[in-house]
Image: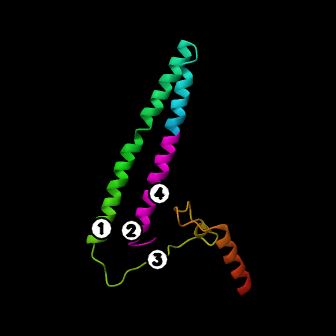
Amino acid sequence: MMIRDTDNLTAELAAVWDEMFEAVGSIMKAAEQVDALATSLPDALGQDISAATVRIFEACAFQDIAGQRIAKVVGALAYADRNAPVPDIVLVDIEEPKPANDESHLLNGPQLPGRILSQEAIDELLALAAQTA
């Protein structure tokens, strides 16, 4: 668990927002295309499909609410970072007991934009590790 790593938390939340915004945009664009195609279908079927696309558009409204909530969390993190007293000793990493076969430390999840290692950098790291082994 990281303590006082608000820059990283803020970056993670910004990445969530960006990815959510992009995904919702793709969903809405596809729904618009389906709705446009529905006009060429027989009346009842076309109307049913158009009604379904309206429900898709309505469901995509979650993005606005989620964005507002993410903005509140980012604001709270920024406020805490500016106003929380800094102790004399700051613990950076707290090790939690893990089972012997736990490999969760190998999983880093999705990488933030701009922090992804290129294949070339990975190859250099592996070559360096091989030289020192």
Q: CA distance from mark 4 to mark 3?
A: 23 Å
| Badge 4 or badge 3: first in the primary sequence | 4
Report the Cα–Cα distance between label 1 and label 2: 9 Å
Q: Secondary structure at mark 4?
A: helix
Q: Earlier in the sequence, mark 2 or mark 4?
A: 2
View extreme (bottom): residue: 132
Look at mark 1 in the image and give the residue it sits on.
Answer: 80
Amino acid type at circle 2 is Thr
- Hey, what amino acid is under mark 4? Ala
| Mark toward the viewer: 3 or 2 | 2
Name the mark nearer the viewer: 4 or 3: 4
* Horizontal arrangement in the rendering, residue 126 relative to residue 7 (left or right): right
Q: Is residue 94 above or below residue 66?
A: below
Q: Position of residue 98 (x, y in %)?
A: 56, 71
Q: Which mark is residue 6?
A: 2
User: Given the image, on which type of amino acid does mark 3 rest?
Assistant: Asp
Residue 112 shown left or right of residue 80 in the figure: right
In this rendering, would 62 be left or right of 30?
left
52 over 104 or under it: above or below: above
Q: Residue at x 52, y 38 (%)?
A: 27
- Which residue does the numbered mark 3 point to in the structure image? 93
Which residue is identified by label 4?
15
Magenta stretch, residue numbers: 1-26
Q: Quadrant of the C terminus?
A: bottom right
